[in-house]
Image (cartoon, rainbow, N blue to C red):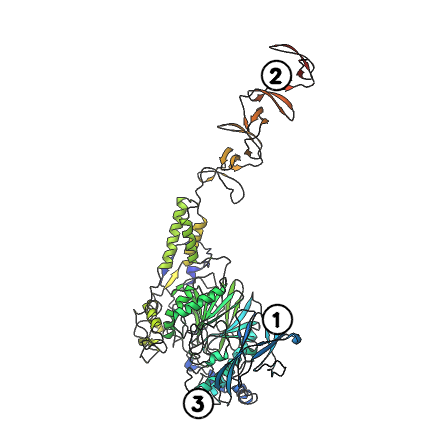
Amino acid sequence: MKTARFVEDEMNKNKNLWKKGVVVAAAAAMITGVVPSVNAFAYGAYDVSQSTFKTDTDNSADFQNWVSNVWQGGEGAFSGTDQVALTPGSDANDLNFGWYSESKGIPAVMIWKVGAKGAAEVFTGTASDISAANWQGKTYTASNKVNIENYFAENTKYCYQYTNDYKEDGTSVWSEQYTYTTQSTDQFSVILTGDPQVGASGSSSDRQANDASVARDAYNWNKTMQQAIKTCPDAAFLLSAGDQINESNSNTEEVRKTRESEYAGYLYPSVFRSLPIAATIGNHDMNGSDYSAHFNNPNSGENLGQTAAGSDFYFNYGDALFISLNSNNRNQAEHRKFMQEAVASNPDAKWKVVIFHSDIYGSGQPHADTDASTNRIIFAPLMDEFDIDVCLTGHDHTYSRSYQVLDGNVVDYDISSGTVADPEGTMYITTGSGSGSKYYNLLNYTPYYIAERTNECLPSFSTIDFTDDSFTIKTYDYNGNRYADDFTITKTEDAQSSDEVIASAEELLNSTDVTYTEESVAALKSALEELKTVKTSLVTAEDPLAADVIAKYGTDADPVRGYGSVKNAENKDGSVNRFKKGLSTLLDKTIYLQVTEGKQEQSADYTAEKAPVIKGLDKATKAVVDAMNALETVIPDGLANEPAADGNWYYYKNNKVADDYTGLAANAYGWWYIQNGKVDFNATGLTSNEYGWWYVQNGTIDFKTTGLAANEYGWWYVEGSKINFNYTGLVANEYGWWYVEGGRINFNHTGLVANEYGWWYVEGGKINFNYTGSAANEYGLWNVKNGRVDFN
């Protein structure tokens, strides 16, 4: 079942898809604000108050046995705050490790290829002082970090163990043995989750040693991850869109202990001993340093985008660049600096993926048009600036997939087939709940930018498949059933964005190297103006609220309170507490064109007739590409000074090949014989023009040839490649010596003829070297011997 079209399918059945190469028929681009008034999404909306998921879990015998025998009894998993967490390294050859220990030593990881423990290598790291107590009476004093760099090969299985205190004398106490398998970097898959928020489901025993909320959520989170790895067994790593845990503060001892219980629940799934975690910082993670104590994130050393939990980080895997931003920090300049560094690390990345917590283009009721919209004015411009392909978010515990969004505008493509090729803009994904600990209702209107959404009350996860030319996301519930439609972005080799096409067109028009015909230049200028109109008509003006929010971030004058509502307003969910129209150009475009100020819209009343939608960008861009390809070079009449694409040299007249012309023509390289408008390099012989008759050899006059040459009119004396009609005398060729008269051999002449070598007897125009006898001329009768007058 496919998602609803953004605009009626019938209007765009034949539309092809472009971003960076554009191959559809040219048509006038236009901008419209029509969106469907009826939502027809595949998986739909649910009233979360009717969900029985929590009680269903509690009543499950499997859950009760797990709590008794695993979580609280048996292995006592609820105290496992010290579980090792793998995180991606800077690239696919690297891997980072992090874990807690109760005493501080020299942390180390021993690793080897399966079957080759004798060749194991030991990598040591650093231990940082912490004080992290849990409800089970353990106090951890060290956060251990080990980075292994330039070690791992593709598609290889490794074993590893770790120790809190490495000793070279062989007395180190090592952990049990685990495995880690690397994947291909050309084609690979990852798992995406969001908001497990372990501990959020709520119980009467919250913030106690046997916190039932943590147990319930850890159990379901583990089921999600077990199903995820079953669905995607070759996953290279996990992308977690934030809110790993629930407690959002760390200001009391009981809260800090509960956070550690929640981390024990988050890290409980055994798949995490083999699956690296790239966990972005959520608003429930941000206020505790325990996040950065558990996770050893790569490329985070500059602490840009920092809160108490940690900062931005990035890593590369094959042709993909992954950037994690801390959306709890609204310092746009820091995030921009960080993204510049990240992009510079892999400037040729085929895929650029950003992950952060706040769903700036989401569809959940609590956040999508309050705090997330505040973050929209900070983070959305960065997605446009750095040409991000996909932005992965969480926060609203509801799944949604956007259309392509550029500067707050939906770029309209036909996605009825579940795919889009070379699109402009960014696709935004909002993840559902990874554990089912908390669900939210969807907004009571469908934002214009939403292509698909659902809040079915089951834990969910996604898989993302990367190839050299495609990005495919598939979403499932924790039972392995489809939770949303699959969707694919494809890329064409050497495709260009509309901005790149505009730059190329302007460069051609401004070039003085080549002159084009007036008609083709006019066509290109017209197409270019159409494209620029599409590009500029919905440009968002500079946002005054963004500047204010950025400048006052973290100060007492900060205009934002809590979840993005106006400061000092208590009801964060009421539209009355949204930022008012006129404060933000981007929010005026992306919210106030849809939501009537001051009241909650009912879905039945919603029409959204002014939603900002760019239609025809692909066609307008294609039209410019076509016009560039159709530019006609002004070709001077005559023979070209360079060969055509097919290697031939052509003679032109009126800007086209003069295939009716045969004769001689000159260019910068000489004179050439043209036959039917093309230089004939096989031509050898005599031909004429207004300057005389010329000897052509291999298609050209070399102006050096002197001798005899024949045509249909006779044999001629050529001097400097030109017939000399003034010449009379004897000339030799390979056939003998000949009498030339007026430039032509006179085959009728018989008699004596002189040259510098003597007098000769010519018979039928040719010296007869076999003749001996008498011959007369006007000077007398002469004795000829062997064709020559013998004066002796």
Q: Residues within 10 Å of mark 3 (few under 14, many from 20)?
A: few
Task: Give the residue at x 46% y 40%.
Answer: 656
| Location of the C terminus (image quadrant) | top right
Q: CA distance from mark 2 to mark 1?
A: 96 Å
The answer to which quarter of the image holds residue 613 is bottom left
Residue 745, percent from left and from top = 59, 21
Instruction: Establish if 399 lies above or below 142.
Output: above
Which of the labelled discs sits on residue 204, or is there none?
3
Say which amino acid is labelled 3.
Answer: Ser
Looking at the rendered structure, the secondary structure element under dot 3 is: loop
* Tag 1 residue: 156
Q: CA distance from mark 1 to mark 3?
A: 47 Å
Give the number of the mark in front: 2 or 3: 2
Circles 2 and 3, Cβ within 8 Å, touching? The answer is no
Q: Earlier in the sequence, mark 2 or mark 3?
A: 3
Say which amino acid is labelled 1.
Answer: Thr
Residue nearest the viewer, comparing 122 with 48 = 122
The answer to which quarter of the image holds residue 384 is bottom left
Q: Earlier in the sequence, mark 1 or mark 3?
A: 1
Say which amino acid is labelled 2.
Answer: Val
Residue nearest the viewer, comparing 741 with 36 = 741
Which of the labelled discs sits on residue 753, or is there none?
2
Residue 370, percent from left and from top = 36, 74
